[in-house]
Image (cartoon, rainbow, N blue to C red):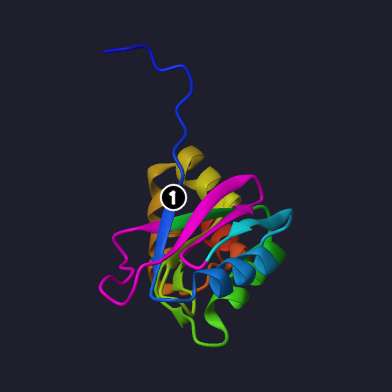
Amino acid sequence: MSQLTKTTIKPCLWFDNQAKEAAAFYCSVFPNSSIISTSEILVEFDLNGMIFTGLNGGPQFKFTEAISFQIICENQDEVDHFWNAFTLNGGEESMCSWCKDKYGLSWQIIPRRFTEMMSTGTPDQIQRVTEAMLKMKKPVISDFENVFRTC
């Protein structure tokens, strides 16, 4: 195999005909984001340093939960910001930090503190935090903290 010097992986999101609209929406949700280029069929956009392509491919394919994007949030304000942006105006709440935006794309809104608890807790703490997550839709960091500390 030849030596690969620079490989780029870039997600391509298939939309019916609203790729530019979706790109503008995502750029409004994420800081440091912008549309790079557009055409009738393609839009390239940067979401806080990650480049995406949006494709107006027609109605043949829809998004499913088999593909989702995780957003690691530093605090509850970030969790609330992303959760509300995606679930309001046509999005859907799901369980365990999952939601869909109005285009049907799935997102996992994950507090960094949750991942820390899951990687550093005792087996009992991890079980309690997991059980709390299973009962939630939008993650609530203080609820995780409370069950993590419970003796």
89 versus 27 height, above or below: below
Instruction: Let me know if residue 52 is in the magenta part.
Output: yes
Q: Is residue 58 left or right of residue 22?
A: left
Q: Residues within 10 Å of mark 1 (few under 14, many from 20)?
A: few
Q: Residue at x 67, y 60 (%)?
A: 30
Q: Nearer the viewer, residue 17 or 80?
A: 17
Q: Residue at x 42, y 54 (%)?
A: 12
Q: Is residue 99 left or right of residue 33?
A: left
Judging by the rendered image, the residue that carries numbered circle 1 is 11
- Res. 58 image quadrant: bottom left
Q: Is residue 93 left or right of residue 140?
A: left
Q: Residue at x 49, y 81 (%)?
A: 91
Q: Most extreme residue toward the bottom, as rendered?
A: 89
Question: What kind of element bears circle 1?
Answer: loop
Circle 1: residue type: Pro
Q: Residue at x 31, y 72 (%)?
A: 62
Which percent across, then down, holds residue 93? Answer: 45, 79
Instruction: Let me know if residue 119 is in the magenta part.
Output: no
The quarter of the image holding the N terminus is: top left
Q: How many numbered discs?
A: 1
Per the rendered image, the range of residues in magenta is 40-68
Q: Is residue 60 left or right of residue 12?
A: left
Q: Is residue 13 visible?
A: yes
58 versus 42 height, above or below: below
Q: Is residue 151 visible?
A: no
Which percent across, then down, holds residue 127? Answer: 38, 54
Which percent across, then down, holds residue 39? Answer: 54, 63
